[in-house]
């Protein structure tokens, strides 16, 4: 690996050290011990400055380099983010699991009782979701000039979820400005509504950050079961909104082009899938609730939570009948839209894959027919189709491999499947498992790797591992 890669990682770590000032400030406000957050801040800053001081001659940045920078940055970030948890005497593998779960916006936890955690730690857990939702590299690119050319686009493409990332405007800086304006704007709006619904500022802020990053960490042991009905609907609405491709918001808010925004195939499928699943779940769970109102909020909330890969809960989803659980497990893998803060392999890939199957089917029936795969009215490049099918194949293979390893933990089939699906798809919420404290060290490390594969959409880590093997 060339020095340029490490120089970029150094810049990212400097940016990451800046982010650690926020939990440090929370500790100062609530008069708590600052050492757990001061330590990773200093370590991150020192390593960042050291790597950034490297002298380089070749400043060319290629797509492969972008993948490696993203993978290394997230690994460093996960390790440094785990350091605070070591100060509360939990094993390193537990700290890694909690850190990776936070940054990948999974929300699976090893804590049996989160309510005993200090304000600083509660803030840090939700803040990792907020950082991971948009990605730490997008933050660094917004405030630190990584490259004088638009080759920084390789980093944006490698980190942002979905099969295709494009600049919204000619400048990357302006693109990131609009993305963050939308991100912060929606978060702030949810915060205001939660305050209006009766929550205090601290809890409203943490829930809003977790929702924005579509993570599942909360400040309550029972997730969001005890918040008001109004606030449950608020969170449900914003989970749905953060599952939408940010390009749609850009078209509506910035370009004032609602007509084109609503033409999005992915958005249409996302809305239809959501409505169909809510109605399907509602019909099948009515008998388990004393009122239609309770069944309705349960279905609306949990479908949104799983489709957006947020992982919040407002009740026991284990009472759902088998057909509902199977449907929700499938939605875990698919998740929401590309260009959102969600996990899963995205609806856009599902659409392309279905159209590819249709094309192959028609070719069998009508060998001489010409069928062009289109997406939003435009022809899809064969390379994108091939990358999509390869991605889904790798996605399934990795899930099966991780399930095989986790099966040695001794849990039954359903628990093993739930654990792997919910972590790999970065959902966190799963059937039969309230937290992952009982899993052994190997399982937690493997699930942590799975969460990284899921969040970074496989290729950055594969490119990194391939490059390490080549350099041996």
Image (tube, rainbow, N blue to C red):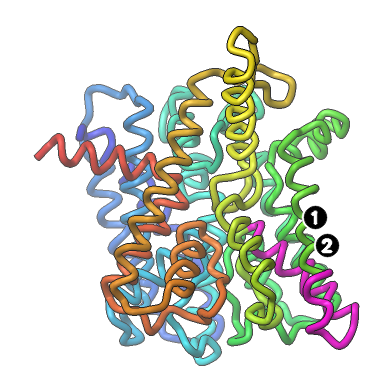
Disc 1 residue crowd, few under 14, some 14–19, many 20+, Cα 10 Å? few
Q: Residue 194: in sight, yes or no?
A: no
Judging depth in this view, the residue of 278 and 262 nearest the camera is: 278
Judging depth in this view, the residue of 237 and 54 nearest the camera is: 237
> Residue under circle 2?
279
Q: x, y percentage for residue 185?
A: 74, 53
The residue most toward the left is 472
Tags 1 and 2 touching, CB below 8 Å: yes
Q: Is residue 285 rendered magenta in the image?
A: yes
The answer to whether residue 59 is above or below residue 41 is above
Q: Residue 37: in sight, yes or no?
A: yes
Judging depth in this view, the residue of 204 and 48 nearest the camera is: 204
Q: Which quarter of the rendered picture does the N terminus lie within?
A: top left
Q: Residue at x 56, y 72 (%)?
A: 430
Q: Is residue 81 rendered magenta in the image?
A: no
Which image quadrant is residue 39 in? bottom left
Q: x, y percentage for residue 236?
A: 76, 66
> Residue under circle 1?
276
Q: Magenta residues?
A: 283-308
Q: Secondary structure at mark 2?
A: helix
Q: Which mark is residue 125?
A: none
Q: Residue at x 38, y 58 (%)?
A: 450
The answer to whether residue 190 is above or below residue 163 is below
By secondary structure, the bulk of the magenta-drawn segment is best described as helix
């Amino acid at each position: 690996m060339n020095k340029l890669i490490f120089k970029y990682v150094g810049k990212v770590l400097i940016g990451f050290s800046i982010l650690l000032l926020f939990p440090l400030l929370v500790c100062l406000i609530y008069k708590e011990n600052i050492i757990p957050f001061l330590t990773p801040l200093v370590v991150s800053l020192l390593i960042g400055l050291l790597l950034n001081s490297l002298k380089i001659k070749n400043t060319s940045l290629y797509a492969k380099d972008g993948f490696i920078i993203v993978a290394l940055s997230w690994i460093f970030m996960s390790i440094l983010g785990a350091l605070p948890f070591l100060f509360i005497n939990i094993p390193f593998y537990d700290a890694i699991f909690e850190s990776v779960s936070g940054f990948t916006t999974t929300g699976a936890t090893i804590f049996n009782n989160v309510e005993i955690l200090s304000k600083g730690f509660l803030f840090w857990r939700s803040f990792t979701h907020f950082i991971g939702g948009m990605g730490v590299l997008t933050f660094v690119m917004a405030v630190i000039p990584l490259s004088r050319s638009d080759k920084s686009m390789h980093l944006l493409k490698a980190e942002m979820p979905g099969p295709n990332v494009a600049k919204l405007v000619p400048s990357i800086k302006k693109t990131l400005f609009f993305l963050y304006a939308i991100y912060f704007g929606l978060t702030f709006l949810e915060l205001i509504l939660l305050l209006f619904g009766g929550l205090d500022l601290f809890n409203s802020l943490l829930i809003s950050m977790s929702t924005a990053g579509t993570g599942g960490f909360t400040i309550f042991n029972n997730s969001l079961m005890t918040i008001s009905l109004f606030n449950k609907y608020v969170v449900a609405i914003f989970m749905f909104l953060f599952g939408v491709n940010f390009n749609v918001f850009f078209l509506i808010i910035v370009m004032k082009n609602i007509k084109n925004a609503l033409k999005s195939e992915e958005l249409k499928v996302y809305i239809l899938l959501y409505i169909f699943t809510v109605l399907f779940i509602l019909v099948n769970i009515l008998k388990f609730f004393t009122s239609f109102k309770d069944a309705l909020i349960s279905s609306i909330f949990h479908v949104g939570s799983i489709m957006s890969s947020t992982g919040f809960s407002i009740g026991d989803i284990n009472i759902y009948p088998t057909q509902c659980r199977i449907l929700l497990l499938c939605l875990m893998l698919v998740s929401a839209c590309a260009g959102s803060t969600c996990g899963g392999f995205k609806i856009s890939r599902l659409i392309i894959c279905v159209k590819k199957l249709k094309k192959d089917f028609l070719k069998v029936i009508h060998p001489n027919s010409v069928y062009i795969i289109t997406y939003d009215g435009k022809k899809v490049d064969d390379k994108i189709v091939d990358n999509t099918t390869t991605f889904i194949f790798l996605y399934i293979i990795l899930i099966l491999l991780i399930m095989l390893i986790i099966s040695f933990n001794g849990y039954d089939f359903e628990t093993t499947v739930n654990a792997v699906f919910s972590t790999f798809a970065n959902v966190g919420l799963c059937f039969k498992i309230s937290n992952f404290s009982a899993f052994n060290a190997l399982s937690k490390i493997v699930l942590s790797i799975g969460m990284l594969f899921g969040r970074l959409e496989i290729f950055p880590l594969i490119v990194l591992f391939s490059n390490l093997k080549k350099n041996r």
